[in-house]
Image (cartoon, helix red, strand yellow):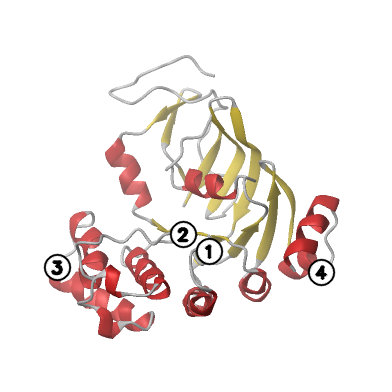
Amino acid sequence: MAEKTRDHGEQEAAPETAEGAAAPGDALVVAENVHKSFGRLEVLKGIDLQVRRGEVMCIVGPSGSGKSTFLRCVNHLEKLTAGRLWVNGELMGYRQKRGRLYELRDSEIAAQRSDIGMVFQRFNLFPHLTVLGNIVEAPVQVKRVPRARATERAMELLERVGLPDKANAYPEQLSGGQQQRVAIARALAMEPSLMLFDEPTSALDPELVGEVLDVMQDLAGGGMTMVVVTHEMGFAREVGDSLVFMDDGVVVESGSPAEVLSNPRHERTQAFLSKVL
């Protein structure tokens, strides 16, 4: 761990790194030797991944393998223990100076996150706001979009996710599938370049899963870059451009969905898929 350092109000330094903070290659997301520990528990043990612009990457694996933790590291909801992560060519959460990493101020991190949409398992809608209020809140408060314009955009998004008639409803009046579609619309309202999905259908009744996956498939067809932690192998096969299998904090195997699902090379991948396919 690097020596604790502060620079013009910046927070303590992360581990030392080589000089030069430009992201390698032209990928939208680049993870380089990403580690994350919670106390003595090492959850991520050196993740190296690249997500191309317009790519849909699906991440699968058993519970506790580090999938959701990695997703939260991408938008700096979790701070890295070691390694580096770039989104859109920017070092996520840090500024590099003289070979050391300094954590950005909260306002700077929030600005980076505004370009990343995230959809959680449990919807996370504001219960005291209507559907329309949930969608317009962030564009108005964070991006200073005029309310009239944000409202117009919100209605367009509700049309896109098939819920224009629910604008004035409250979250408790919606089914789980409807709430998740509103959550997707809310994330899209910020016009992100990247969408992260953390098992977006795992909390839904089986008959509601399809309506959410249909919206996600529509996004993929429109060229949205997406990283999807999922147990929906059919979605991964049909919509994913790449499939990553994680176990015990490492990437065990990756490749095209057809390749990994039909002809897994690693015995851990084979054992996992034999239980879920």
C-alpha gap between disc 1 and disc 4: 24 Å
Disc 4: which residue: 262
Residue 195 placement, left or right of 112: right
Q: Horizontal and vertical percent for residue 68? A: 54, 49
Label of residue 121 in the image: 2
Q: Is residue 149 above or below residue 121?
A: below
Label of residue 202 in the image: 1
Return the residue nearer the eye: 253 or 87.
253
C-alpha gap between disc 3 and disc 4: 49 Å
Amino acid on which disc 1 is placed: Ser
Q: Earlier in the sequence, mark 2 or mark 3?
A: 2
Disc 3: which residue: 147
Q: Residue at x 37, y 84 (%)?
A: 162
Q: Quadrant of the N terminus?
A: top right
Q: Quadrant of the C terminus?
A: bottom right
Q: Earlier in the sequence, mark 3 or mark 4?
A: 3
Q: Are marks 1 and 4 in contact (CB under 8 Å)?
A: no
